[in-house]
Image (spheres, helix red, strand yellow):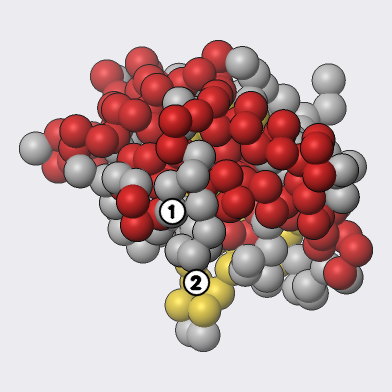
Amino acid sequence: MTPLIEVRGLEKKFGLMTVLRGVDLVQSSGECVALIGPSGCGKSTLLRCLNQLEIPDAGSLRIGDIPFPAGRPLDRPTLRRLRQAAGMVFQQFHLFPHRTAFENVLEGPLHVLRQSRSQAEKTARDLLAKVGLAARMDHRPSQLSGGQQQRVAIARALAMEPQVLLLDEPTSALDPELRDEVREVLQQLGDEGMTMVLVTHDMNLARRIADRVLFLDSGKVSESGPPSQLFEHPQTDRAREFLRRVRG
């Protein structure tokens, strides 16, 4: 079976600093891959390269039937297809502050997917109910907790009907008691077969929803395996030291 995501030899530099050094990632449809590692190891840059928020310097990438070589930005029609195929959820939510939860989720189906208003409204209502916010549809972000805002952001990404969900530290901006709200939503999506690439320092989240964990160090994939293997029996000294530190 052809993998949904294929990254080969990915390299990215910022000035004289090399952030990614020949990274490979092959991921099947329905699989959740968690990227972990110390700050500055390149995991968020890898995620941003996957939807062209960063333009890689070398290597090749493909999501679904959209290939994109390194070294140049995509043309607008292809970039639009890619952004629809790869929905992005950020650490800081990025909701429209003057719009309600319902209006935030409605925007994509109505204006990008060009659904009819009745269909777009049904999509928004259904997705907010899916993430447990049916009773908060008319609330603006300032009236919602951090966990609720992140669930709105997830619903907004899902409204674009993506093939893959890219999640950049989705629980790190939340108070500990709110993280479980988001973990439960992401676990449900994983159980339903949503393909996800997850950057996280939340080892509980990675253990809970990931099928495979990649440990990045100095811009390379140093180690990979199922959560039970990587967390309980890491093979490299660097991974052992990192996991010891994050576990406290």
The circle drawn on residue 82 is none
Residue in view at x 61 percent, y 16 percent: 192
> Is residue 241 visible in this depiction of the protein?
no
**Tag 1: residue type?**
Arg
Closer to the camera in the image, 3 or 189: 189
- Above or below for 181 versus 173: above
Picture coordinates of residue 215 (x, y %)? 41, 40
Q: In front here: 24 or 50?
A: 50
Viewer-proximal residue among 61 and 130: 130
- Amino acid type indicated by mark 2: Thr
Q: Is residue 76 left or right of residue 184?
A: right
Q: Nearer the viewer, mark 2 or mark 1?
A: 1
Badge 1: how crowded within 10 Å, few (<14), some, or many (20+)?
some
Residue 110: x %, y % from top left = 78, 50
Based on the displayed image, in which of its 4 quarters is residue 184 positioned?
A: top left
Q: CA distance from mark 2 to mark 1?
A: 41 Å
Instruction: Using the rendered image of the protein, determine whether residue 125 is visible from the camera's viewpoint.
Output: yes
- Identified at 53% across, 59% down, the residue is 99
In the rendered view, tell whether residue 75 sits above or below residue 244: below
The kind of secondary structure element at disc 1 is loop
Q: Position of residue 57 (x, y in %)?
A: 68, 71
Q: Residues within 10 Å of mark 2 (few under 14, many from 20)?
A: some
Q: Residue 140 — which label?
A: 1
Residue at 72% in and 32% down: 122
Q: Nearer the viewer, residue 235 or 92?
A: 92
Considering only vertical position in the picture, is 136 above or below 92?
Answer: above
Q: Residue furthest left?
A: 248
- Residue of label 2: 18
Q: Secondary structure at mark 2?
A: strand
Q: From the viewer's perspective, tell me whether residue 211 is left or right of residue 120.
A: left
| Label pair 2/1, CB-CB below 8 angstroms | no
